[in-house]
Image (cartoon, rainbow, N blue to C red):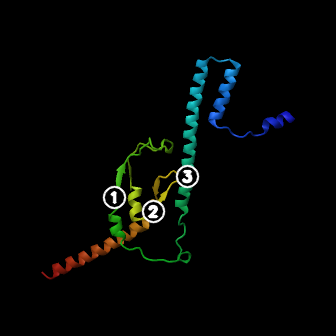
Amino acid sequence: MLQEQQNSTPKPPRSGLAILTLVIIALVSSQIYSLFQIQQLKNALTEAAADIEVLANGLDYTTALAKNADSFAHSHPFSDIRLKINVTPLSNALERVLSLQSVQYNWRKDVLPYANFGDELQIGLIAQDVQKIFPGLVVAMPNGYLAVDYEMLTPILVEAIKEQQIQINDLQALLSDITINR
């Protein structure tokens, strides 16, 4: 019974390097393996440790993405005026939107290999450019890279379209006046 309890007691995790060191010491002291075999084992364990590190980074990245996705998805779930203060109309939306540049790109998969970026051609904005114009639309990820909250861009685009429609209406009225006065 005591033996079962001792075996079921969780042991604190050890670093990959500590485990590697213990395995090599055990093998050398038992003289079961040749030096060449120990070197091969060390290389295999080192590769496995690198894979574990990539996996750990990937999990950190996935966790950060999930937290930011949750933040984006729930950043403004309510639109009720009763929940808002300091409400002011957005101005110069068209001018500011016109200063953004949409781009096509492919991901640099070598920079964040654990992000599992696809090979497909992407369309989007450059976060650093958006940050200069609409700082509230850009969030810094835990790894220091920037992300754009495209959902929050929607009300800005709506206002830009409205501003543009006013310009179109003014030009149509001017054209109509010119045509009538001929």
Indicate the quadrant containing the C terminus: top left, top right, bottom left or bottom right: bottom left
Q: Quadrant of residue 9?
A: top right
Check disc 1: other Cα within 10 Å, few if <14, some if 14-19, many if 20+: few
Residue 159 in the image, given as x and y percentages of width and height: 39, 71
Q: Nearer the viewer, residue 162 or 33?
A: 33
Check disc 2: other Cα within 10 Å, few if <14, some if 14-19, many if 20+: some
Q: Nearer the viewer, residue 67 or 20?
A: 20
Which of the two labelled residues, at mark 3 and mark 2, occupies the earlier sequence position? 3
Which of the two labelled residues, at mark 3 and mark 1, occupies the earlier sequence position? 3
Mark 3 = which residue? 64
Mark 1 = which residue? 101
Q: Residue at x 35, y 56 (%)?
A: 102
Check whether the beta carbons of the residues at disc 2 and disc 1 lie within 8 A of each other: no
Indicate the quadrant containing the N terminus: top left, top right, bottom left or bottom right: top right
Q: Residue at x 41, y 44 (%)?
A: 108
Q: Residue at x 39, y 55 (%)?
A: 126
Q: Quadrant of residue 133?
A: bottom left
The kind of secondary structure element at disc 2 is helix
Indicate left or right for 23 with 80 as reference: right
Which of the two labelled residues, at mark 2 and mark 1, occupies the earlier sequence position? 1
Distance (Cα) linking label 3 and label 1: 27 Å
